[in-house]
Image: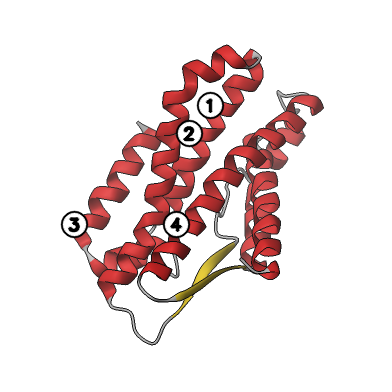
Amino acid sequence: MDKDEIKDILISVLALSLAFTVARLDGIFGIVRGASLTLADGALLFLVSLFTLGIGFVLHEMAHKYMAIRYGSWAAYRAWPMGLMLALGGSLFGVVFAAPGATYIYTPYMGRRESGIISLVGPLTNVALAFAFLLAAPLILLALPPLVAEMLIAQGIGINLWLALFNMLPIGPLDGKKVLDWSLPIWAVVAGGIFALLFL
């Protein structure tokens, strides 16, 4: 990774972690009616979000990058300033627009299948991480204080499933659009499965 890529990843992780923390505190609505968490709890939530989202976001983007490289392309993550502002702005209303940037891929030619696979590995990485946090939950509960453990498990599962589902939306430059362009059945199974895991 070059310096610009590292800088853009760090900025994106910090912005998204803040956005998820603000959204979890119900944004401006929580401020108006009085947030249920103390300032210390809010700071702890930010640190937990920074850890869980840092892992989920970085591995999501690196999955895209290294799958693209496997197909013979050059790839690098770049932040999107408008996406960063949308993430922070939306969090004030309890919603996180989780697209602060993207892994840009440069290649003379790439078919829909290759593009779809490269796009799919990011959300699937987040699903795998959500299951990893779920499986590790008993150990986390034993090793950490109850509040920290519960936050870590909830954020580890919730953030990763939300990143997966958001990215599978079949719109614009999101992963879901490229997966759908490649295969409707695969998109439907993956997006439907993630939706079920997150909401059911």
Please say if the residues under marks 2 and 4 sit with CB atoms less than 8 Å apart. Answer: no
Q: Earlier in the sequence, mark 1 or mark 4?
A: 4
Mark 4, residues whose alpha carbon is within 10 Å: few (<14), some, or many (≥20)?
Answer: many
Give the Cα separation between the discs numbered 4 and 3. Answer: 22 Å
- Percent across and percent down for residue 53 are 59, 43
Q: Earlier in the sequence, mark 4 or mark 3?
A: 4
Q: Earlier in the sequence, mark 2 or mark 4?
A: 4
Of residues 69 and 85, which is closer to you in this image? 69
Circle 3: element type? helix
Looking at the rendered structure, the kind of residue marked 4 is Ala
Circle 4: element type? helix
Q: Earlier in the sequence, mark 3 or mark 1?
A: 1
Give the Cα separation between the discs numbered 2 and 4. Answer: 18 Å
Give the Cα separation between the discs numbered 1 and 4. Answer: 23 Å
- Residue 157 has which mark? 2
Instruction: Kindly identify which residue carries mark 4.
Output: 63
Of residues 27 and 54, which is closer to you in this image? 54
Looking at the rendered structure, the kind of residue marked 2 is Ile
Q: Earlier in the sequence, mark 3 or mark 2?
A: 2
In the depicted structure, whether residue 137 falls above or below residue 29: above
Mark 1, residues whose alpha carbon is within 10 Å: few (<14), some, or many (≥20)?
Answer: many
- Percent across and percent down for residue 22 are 69, 41
* Eye-nearest disc, 3 or 1: 1
- Residue 27 has which mark? none
Residue shown at 72% from the left, 24% from the top: 37
Q: Quadrant of residue 116?
A: bottom left
With 58 as the anchor, is 35 left or right in this view?
right
